[in-house]
Amino acid sequence: MVCASAGNHAQGFAWSCKKLNIKGMVFMPSITPRQKVNQTKMFGEGKIDIVLTGDTYDDCAIAAKQFTEAHDMTLIPPFDDYMIIEGQGTVGVEILEELSHIDFVFIPVGGGGLCSGVGSYFKTFSPQTRIIGLEPEGAPSMLEALKAGHPVTLDHIDRFVDGAAVKRVGDITFKICQEVLNDMHLVPEGKVCTTILKLYNEDAIVVEPAGALSIAALDDYAEQIKGKTVVCLVTGSNNDIDRMPEIKERSLQYEGLKHYFLIRFAQRPGALREFVTNVLGPQDDITRFEYMQKTNKEFGPALVGIELQSRGDYDRLLKNMNSFHIDFSELNKDDKLFGYLV
């Protein structure tokens, strides 16, 4: 058997291979967090081989299909298959066995299998429940499909929310989601990161980016869900500890607490000290300082990262820079420069 997966489907596949005592091939994107790879190996217990290939799920899915055809094997798809959807729909069965009169269910959406299965079950046995699908802002494949009236292939996606970052949803799942979804909503990656950190620090819950989508969206539905019975599907805790610095960085930027500037300091003694004394507030912190050009005799451009205590401190910081005639460029607002320098 063969499968392609960003991580969670691969673990179920690996466990099945062990239980059935058959050999399996798992294709995963090359950027898959190490923790997901190790978990998949653990569940397989020697019954699987893992191939890391491609930059996205869609890339490794093509490789898996080609391998399957070349070796006359069986492909187990992660979402676009009626039996897979039926299996994922058992999550809905479990929810309604524990709760009744549910007003909202928030479901992360990647390829659409989980949403199709759970949504179909709820529409049959709890039709009053509103089904809300959530995608990362950088990979809105289901939202764009719903707008177009058919699945579309996105040219580019942000791969950070790896468990829900697909370029194209399934044909079967699209048709089902078209019927069962009451709303499709996008969540910024930075908000996902803030939610991951909050769940970890305040509730001792470890979630991966895709798993945090449902809880991250709640603020945007605050008025609608007030006083209602709400279920959020947290679809995975495969969060590699190596990703935490990036998660914190994205969260700080989203919350307006971390900013990067290209500042052209006059090449004279005391210029940096004046900047620290006159421009920065008592709680502001320089978290990165790097001269970009050291040979200019008049000006020395420097990459400066500044962390603030509150979002409101940003306006004060800009006001101080302008008042003291600091020559600066805001990198957070320039995607190209930010990508090159930060």
Image (cartoon, rainbow, N blue to C red):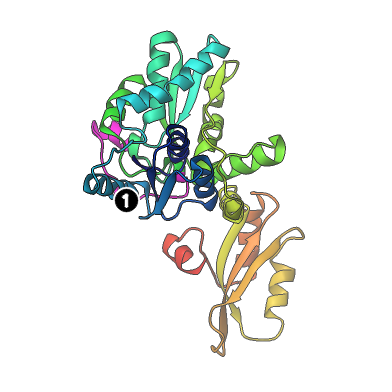
Q: Residue at the front extreme?
A: 21
Quadrant (top left/top right/bottom left/bottom right) for the N terminus: top left
Q: Position of residue 169 (x, y in %)?
A: 31, 37
Residue 241 drawn above or below residue 210: below
Q: Amino acid at mark 1?
A: Asp
What is the span of residues highlighted in magenta in the rendered image? Answer: 143-162
Looking at the image, how many numbered discs can be counted on the residues?
A: 1
Q: Mark 1 = which residue?
A: 59
Q: Position of residue 209 (x, y in %)?
A: 52, 42
Q: Residue at the right extreme?
A: 282
Q: Residue at x 50, y 69 (%)?
A: 341
Q: Secondary structure at mark 1?
A: helix
Q: Is residue 182 visible?
A: no
Q: Is residue 42 visible?
A: yes
Residue 272 drawn above or below residue 334: below
Q: Position of residue 114 (x, y in %)?
A: 41, 28
In this picture, residue 310 sits left or right of residue 15: right
Crowding at dot 1, Cα within 10 Å, few <14 / some 14-19 / many 20+, comes out as some
In this picture, residue 137 sits left or right of residue 202: left
Q: Residue at x 62, y 39 (%)?
A: 206
Residue 325 drawn above or below residue 307: below
Residue 329 drawn above or below residue 198: below
Q: Main secondary structure of the magenta part?
A: loop
- Residue 197 belongs to magenta span: no
Q: Position of residue 271 (x, y in %)?
A: 68, 79
